[in-house]
Image: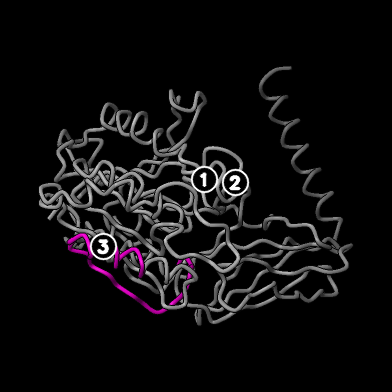
Amino acid sequence: MNTSRFVASLLAGLALGSTVFAQRPNQTPPPTSPEVAGDRSVTFRLAAPKAEAVKLAGSDLPGLGQGKDMTKGTNGVWEVTCGPVPPGSYRYNFSVDGVSVIDPRNPKTSESNENTWSLVHVPGADWQDLKDVPHGAVAQVTYWSTTLKKFRRLHVYTPPGYEAGSDRYPVFYLLHGAFDSDNSWSTVGRAGFILDNLIAAGKAKPMVMVMPAGHTGPFTFGRGSMSGEFEPDFVTDIMPLVEKRYRVRTERANRAIAGLSMGGAHTLNIGIPHLEKFSCVGVYSSGIFGIVQRPGAPAPQGPSFEEKHKAILDDAKLKEGLKLFWFATGKDDFLVETTRKTVEMFKAHRFNVVYRETDGAHTWDKWRDYLNEFAPQLFQ
C-alpha cells in the first residue's frame, strides 16, 4: 500500500470509529474523581452500576472512621462528599461489596507496606503545596542488600540544581512508619515539596534526603519490622551506597536521621549506637518501644535499651557533637506515653532533648508538620 492510500485508509477508520462512538448516546461519560471544590470539600465518585454497596475508606481523611457510605445515582455512579477538610494529602480507596479497590479515575497513588492507595491533595497550606519555585527530584533506587541477600529499594530527593552542579550536600535520612513504605514520605508525606518550599524561602539548607524501606519482610509487629534486620542493612548497605552514588558530605556535622512511629524507633536503634555519625536526630510520634509496659503485654525479654547502650548514653564526648535531639508527638497519639518516658530517660542521662507535644494523633497531617518544623533546624 502506498503512503497516500494508507493515510486515506487511516482517516476513514478514524471517521468510522467516531461515528460508531457517536451512535451510542446512552453511554455514560466517565465520572470525575476526586473533585476538590473551592471550599476544600472533596467529592469522590465510582462507576459501579452492578454493585450493591460502596463505601469510601481511608484512615487519613478526617472523620471517616470505619468508612462512609456512598450513594448510587440513576446512572450507576456512586458518590459521596467529604469536608471541608484541612489542606493536605489524603490516602483513600473504595470498598465495593466488601472488596477494596483504588479509584480507577485517579492516577495519583501512594504505596503502603503491602498495598496501594489512591491519593488526593487538598491545597491551601503554602508550605506543602506545589508552588512556582525551583524543584528538586525524587529518584527510585534499587540496590542489592549484602546484609539481607536480596534486592531492596529506596527513594532519594536531590535539591534544585543538584544535576547541573558539583557541590557536596548534607544528607538527611528520613524513615517511614509501620504501615508505610519507602514511597510514602514522597507521596502522602509531601517531603520533596516541603523541602522545595523551605529551600526556596531560605529556611532550610539544600540537602540530599534519603527515604529507605524499613520493612525487611511481610509486616507483623516484631517480625521484619522491629526484629533488628533493618538496622544492619542501613549501616552496612544503605549509607555506603548513598555516600558512593551521591555527592553527600560524610562528616558527622552534615548527617541527620529522623523517622515516624516505627521509623522513630528505627532512628533510635541506629542513631544511638552510631551516635558518632549523626549530629541531628528526630523522633516523630515514637520512642523506645517497650519502655511503657502495656497491661496484659508479655514482659520484655533481655536487657532494656537503656541497659544495652549505657556506655553511649553516659558518654559526655558523644553528646558534644549532637546539635539537635528533637521529639514531637500529638497529645492524642497512642504512643504519647512512650515518647514521654523516652524523653525522660534521655534527660536523665543528660541529653539536651527538645520535646514538642502538639495537638493531634498518629496521623500524616502531624508528621508533615513535624518535618516542616524539623528540617529548617538541620545542619545549622
Lower position in the chain sequence, tag 3 or tag 1: 1
Residue on which disc 3 sits = 326
**Residue 196 among those drawn in magenta:** no
Q: Residue at x 70, y 17 (%)?
A: 2
Q: Residue at x 18, y 52 (%)?
A: 314
What percent of the width, then of the height, locates residue 109? 57, 53
User: Which corner quadrant of the image does residue 370 belong to?
Assistant: bottom left
In the rendered view, does 203 fall on the left or right side of 371?
left
**Could you classify mark 3 by the number of other residues whose Cα lies within 10 Å: few (under 14), some (14-19), or many (20 or more)?**
many
What percent of the width, then of the height, locates residue 160? 25, 46
Count of number-bearing discs: 3
Colour logic? one colour
Residue on which disc 2 sits = 219
Q: Are marks 1 and 2 in contact (CB under 8 Å)?
A: yes
The type of residue carrying mark 1 is Ser
Q: Residue at x 77, y 70 (%)?
A: 78
Q: CA distance from mark 1 to mark 2?
A: 6 Å
Residue on which disc 1 sits = 225
Q: Are marks 3 and 2 in contact (CB under 8 Å)?
A: no
- The kind of secondary structure element at disc 2 is loop
Lower position in the chain sequence, tag 1 or tag 2: 2
Q: Residue at x 17, y 37 (%)?
A: 249
What percent of the width, then of the height, locates residue 108? 56, 54
Which residues are drawn in magenta?
A: 340-365
Q: CA distance from mark 3 to mark 1?
A: 23 Å
Quadrant containing the N terminus is: top right
In the rendered view, does 195 fall on the left or right side of 86?
left
